[in-house]
Amino acid sequence: MDTRIPKPYGEAVAPAQTLDRRDFLKQGIKVAGTAVAGGIAGTAALSAQGAEPIGKDFPAWSNTMGKGLSTYGQPSRFEDPVKRYAASGYGTLAPGTGSARSPIEKLEGVITPNGLHYDRSHNGTPDIDPAKHKLLIHGLVKRPLTFSIAELSRYPMVSRICFLECAGNSSGNAVAAEPPQVSAGNVHGLISCADWTGVPLALLLNEAGVEPGGKWLLAEGADSAAMSRSIPIEKAFDDAIVALYQNGERIRPENGYPVRLLLPGWEGNMNVKWLNRIKVTDGPTHTKDETSKYSDPMADGKARQFTFEQGVKSVITRPSGTMTMSGAGLYEITGIAWSGAGRISRVEISLDGGATWRDALLTGQALPKSVVRFRLPWEWNGSPAQLQSRAIDEKGNVQPTRKMYKAENAVDGRFHNNSIVAWGVDADGSIKNVYS
C-alpha cells in the first residue's frame, strides 16, 4: 500500500473546452439518430456517426452495469491492504495465542469497524453455539441464576460508546532498546472504539440478590484458556454491561460472541470475552491472568496489582511511522486520544520534540471513556521535525513522557505504557519512530 502522504491540493485540471451551439446540436442528433427505429432519410448516416460511443472517455465503471446486490457488504477490493496486524508469539504451537492489532493509521473518525477491532486472545477463538451458551451468576447471591442468550436478549438494554485497550498496548515502545520501525498500528494498535449494546450488569446482580459480604466478582470466559479476572463489585454497579452487540450487529467471534463483559475505561482483558460465569466473592480471586500477567513490576522490585484504569493517552496516526511526506507544503496532523478516567479535555501538539506546544482541535463530541479525534493544520517547510501529541483529561491527568514511564517501571515493564509517542520527520519526508 502506498504510504506517501499527499499534499491536500487537487490535481490541476485544464480548462474545459467550449462547445458551440452547432456542435451541441450535432451531438444531440447523433444520440437521437441511434434511438430512432425507422426509415427516415439519413438514418444510416446518422447511425454511422453515432457508432462511436458517447462515453468513450469515461472509465468502464461509468458505462457498464455494476455488481448485483449482496446479503452482507464487504470493503472494496482496493481497500484490501487495510487489515489488522496479526502475530502469535508461539507459532504453530498455539496459533490462537497472540494479538491482531487495529491499523489505526489507516482509519478515520473514532469508531473502529468490527472487522478491524483489535483482538487479543489467549488460546484462540472458540466456535460457540449461542443456542447452547449459558451465563451463570452464583457465589454470594441469594438466588443463583442461569441465563441463555435468548433470555438475556429480553432484558432492557443500554448502549455505550467506549474504547477497549489492551494493558500491553505500546509495549514495543516500552521495552525495545531502539524504537521499532513499524507503523503506528503495529506498536499502538491494541486500541479500538465501538458502540457496545447489552444488559446492565447491575440489573442481573440485583435480580440474583448480592449478599452483604459480596465485594468482588470473578468473571470467567468459555474459551479453552478459561480467561478470568477479579473485579470490584463497585464497577459492576457503575457502568458495566453484559454486551451482546458491537456497532449495531452481534459481537464478532474474536471479540466475545455471543456475549462479553464490558468495563468502560478498564484494561482490556478484564472485559472478559465469551463470558459464561460471574461468581460473587468476598475478595479478589488472584487468578493466573492477574498474577502471572497483567501486574506491573516497578523499578524498586515491587509490583503493582489491580491497576484497572487505563491512563490518559494519545497518538498521532498521520503522519506516522513508515509513511513518507510528499514534499514541503500544507498537511494535516491527526490522531486519537482517550482516557479511562473520563473525557479528554485537551490535546496539545509539538512540532519540535516537546520544546513548544499548541492546542489541537478536538472534532466531534468528547465522550467519557471513549476515543476523540484531534486535528491540526501544519505547513511543513521541508526541514527535519519531531511530532508529538500530549493528552489531558477532565480530571487533570496529563500524558507522561517516556522517561517518566521508564523511571516508574522495571526495565522489562510493559503494561500501561501511556507515554508520549514521537515521530521524527526527516528532510526527505521519511517518518520514523523515535524516543524523546
Image (tube, rainbow, N blue to C red):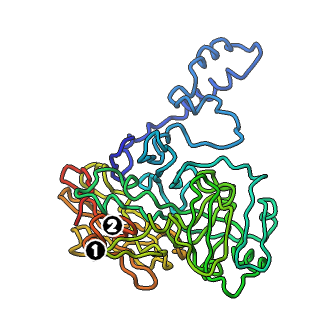
Q: Which amino acid does the dot numbered 2 rest on? A: Gly
**The C terminus sits in image quarter:** bottom left
Circles 1 and 2: CB atoms closer than 8 Å:
yes
In the image, residue 237 sits, relative to residue 182, either above or below, namely below
**Which x, y percent locates residue 411?**
27, 66
Nearer-N-terminus badge (1/2): 1
In the image, residue 280 sits, relative to residue 250, either above or below, namely below
User: In the picture, residue 407 is in which quadrant?
Assistant: bottom left
Residue at left 17%, top 58%? 383
Nearest to the observer: residue 83 or residue 215: 215
**Which x, y percent locates residue 58?**
52, 31
Residue at left 50%, top 64%? 288
Disc 1 crowd rating (10 Å Cα; few below 14, some 14-19, many 20+) is some
Query: In the picture provided, is 226 more to the left or to the right than 311?
Result: right
Query: In the picture provided, is 321 more to the left or to the right than 335?
Result: left
Q: Which amino acid does the dot numbered 1 rest on? A: Ala
Question: Is residue 234 visible to the viewer in this orientation of the structure?
Answer: yes
Q: Which residue of the protein is positioned furthest toward the bottom in this rendering? A: 212
Residue at left 38%, top 40%? 14
Marks 1/2: CA–CA distance:
9 Å
**The N terminus sits in image quarter:** top left
Please name the residue that numbered disc 1 is placed on. Answer: 299
Nearest to the observer: residue 270 or residue 392: 270
Please name the residue that numbered disc 2 is placed on. Answer: 413
Disc 2 crowd rating (10 Å Cα; few below 14, some 14-19, many 20+) is many
